[in-house]
Image (spheres, coloured by chain):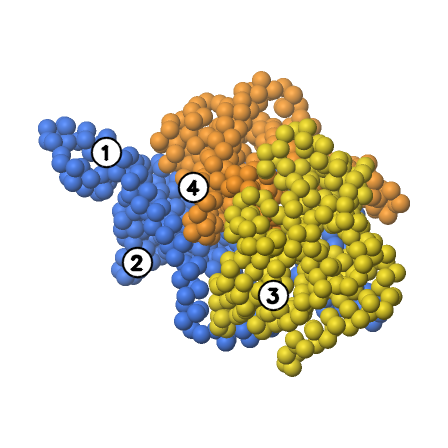
Amino acid sequence: MDQSVISARDLDLTFQTKDGPVHALKGVSLDIEKGDFVSFIGPSGCGKTTFLRCIAALEQPTGGSLTVNGLTPEEARRSRAYGYVFQAAGLYPWRTIAGNIKLPLEIMGFSREEREARVNKVLQLVDLEGFGGKYPWQLSGGMQQRASIARALAFDADILLMDEPFGALDEIVRDHLNEQLLALWKRTQKTIGFVTHSIPEAVYLSTKIVVMSPRPGRISDVIESPLPPERPLEIRDSKEFIEVAHRVREGLRAGHSDDD
Amino acid sequence: MSWIVGALLFWAVAWAVNVALARSPWHGSRAVRVAVPLIFGLTLLVLWQGLVRGLEVNPVILPAPTDIAATFANSTDVLWVDFVQTVLKGALSGYAMGCGAAFLTALAIDRSAFLTAGLLPIGNFVAALPIVGIAPILVSWFGFDWHSKAAVVVVMVFFPVLVNVVQGLREADAMQKDLMRTYAASYWQTLVKLRLPAAMPFVFNGLKIATTLALIGAIVAEYFGSPIKGMGFRISTGVGRLAIDLVWAEIAVAALVGTAFYGIVAMIEKLVTFWHPSQRVG
Amino acid sequence: MHILCTTHTYAYGAWLGKLMKRALPVLTVLAVIVGIWYLGAWRMNMPWALQQAERAEQTLSTGELFKATMNQTRPRVPAPHQVAAELWSVTGEMAIKGRAMSKRSFIYHGWVTLRTTLTGFALGVTLGILGAVAITYSRVSEMSLMPWAIVSQTIPIVALAPMIIVLSNAVGIEGRGVPKAIISAYLCYFPVLVGMVKGLNAPGPQQLDLLKTYNASAAQSFFKLRLPASMPYLFTSLKVAIAAALVGTIVGELPTGAINGLGARILIGDQFGTPLAIWAALIAATCLAGVLVVVIGGLQTVVLRAMGMAR
């Protein structure tokens, strides 16, 4: 076992449905190192979200092996090894923003002072100082999503799993949040797994891009990004960026079966 | 004749005022929202008064509102005794016990998806049944005093509340439950922090339905036997003795109590579920 | 439409499996309820059985005691099979003897209750729909009526029942049927009103604007858009309303000295001290409610399917 934080070997996941078995994942092998920012990209049905949910022990693989921090996913979940961000912010409407961020802290038994301190810290991290007393429905969609990221950061797990967190937001807000996410990743040194279906987003954010294809859900390409760690938004017009994006697009096209 | 003309004139003027208010730029304001229905209600009372006086209706059949008000003012002691007997002892104690029992039952069966799936359709059906019919049975079991009335109320409010709590506990969506799983939250933590708050709009829906049922149950049960006090007792004997104005005064009390009871529960609902889209407006 | 197509592709076995999956929990809970009922009958009737035995200076074995709690003529809690037998004796048995419409037959009393319920239902639904149309199209009506409609449901109408009978007798509407129908209508108009207000306002601004671009008249937009769009809401509220109408009828029959109808049988059973009759009437009312809800549900399926809105 080397430095891998997440390690998958020949992972299979088959759902039994009325129309017969569906291979959501087949023979997926992947290593994610500490501090990596890994994007999973592919068309719907390629298993990118399913893979993320396997890591989080929200789905049970039917074959192969998967370890998180050297533990089984279930053990890792119980030791609260990761924070998870869903596509919808999913904030509780009856709690304020600060109250929502405190939710995992209450469940995990942090003391009152510790909770206050952590809320203030993560609100700062996601640029939401002063909004702690607001209710979610009083904020914009982008702010809600930032609050949900703060909620995932609050208990300081080393791994952050994000399932299309910006998928429902418009492009301008998304650019802004991407920039903030990169800054946050650099400051916190977390290992991030990020599901997306936007090529520019994947290339802009990641140190490693995992291209997946459907039927059966599998990895068709893994691209180590040559981009420097320092990434202003303008980098998206650079030659390297366009080359990586091209390779991702090629990978997606190759993986596409001809029936759609 | 002048009574009728006067009443109809009042109706016409009041309606015109309401139309003007509803079309005015302030139609959304709170004051107008309250004033319009009040004016409408007042109109109905004036019309009632005018028709009873103008057509010289026998007061044994239908007394005028002013006569009822006079009786109301003269017999507050009787009305109070009946209020205590029927509302405080019968309806309220039964309401508290029935809602509490329904809530605990819902929590008890919550852990079994099988039981929930079986109980929900049955509970929904039973909630729609004329359960008041068991009143004579319960009166024969628990005697004439308020205990049997409370028992009827318990049975009547139990199923609507049960169904709503069970339904409400299923409200939390899959994503929010997954979130709790990622925190490795226990069953009770998920229940207290997620599922109960999410269930509150449903719970209050059940509690509001139960307010009216509680009063109906307490009053009907008194038709099947009661000590010589209570609203149901007064109404059923009053009709026989042609003390119609006292009966109407009791009905006025029942109406006021029913509306106030519902209003109080609705107010608590507003405080608890302030976050729900249906409460946020305005 | 989509759903219609897929249901046909389901194999029959899968359909049966799905039905079982839904029916099994319900049947289990029903079985548990009947079990609790038997237990209750055994427990509640035991004192009397013991007392009788003591008077006859006998000692009962457990089996004999159990038997003695299951066949009393005036039990505190009649056992389910006793109620079933009682119910059969006043329905099926009378029908076989050709006395279905005699005064002792529950078929007759059920029919009386059903007639009143349907009258009240028709009245209530009409009022509810008219009210909803008025509220949708006139702001004065909405502001004046809606709060009172809500208040009307918080008033325990049974308090009014005796009065309504006095009044309708005075006005000259003879017969007990009409006042009971009024109570029944009072209970069932509200769900229809609320459901129809929701339904008539179901079309979104885009759909209403589209008709505006066609320069459609108010009547056209009502009959071509609002009314069809409200149908799913209407049927959902009709199911609530028919049950409410039955509750209203029975409540109306209870305290008003009626002699015909299932509610009146409960009252008479109480006065004559025959608990079996009360329980049988309650179960009969339950069956009637079930049949009515199922009928409306069937109507809903047929109509919505014909309109292409089936779910």
Chain letter of mark 3 equals A
Q: Which of marks 2 and 1 is in front?
A: 1
> What amino acid type is highlighted by mark number 3?
Gly
Chain B shade: orange
Chain letter of mark 2 equals C
Q: Distance between the residues labelled 4 and 2?
A: 23 Å
Left or right? Give the position of C199 relative to A179.
left
Asked whether the residues under the numbered discs 4 and 3 touch, taking CB atoms below 8 Å apart as contact, a structural biologist would say no
Chain A shade: yellow
Q: Residues within 10 Å of mark 1 (few under 14, many from 20)?
A: some
Chain C shade: blue
Q: How far apart are marks 2 and 1 (CA)?
A: 31 Å
Q: Which residue is drawn at 79% across and 49% down?
A: A183
**Residue indicated by mark 1:** C46
Q: How crowded is mark 4: few (under 14 residues within 10 Å), some or many (20 or more)?
A: many
Identity of the residue furthest to the bottom in this view: A258
Discs 4 and 3 share one subunit = no
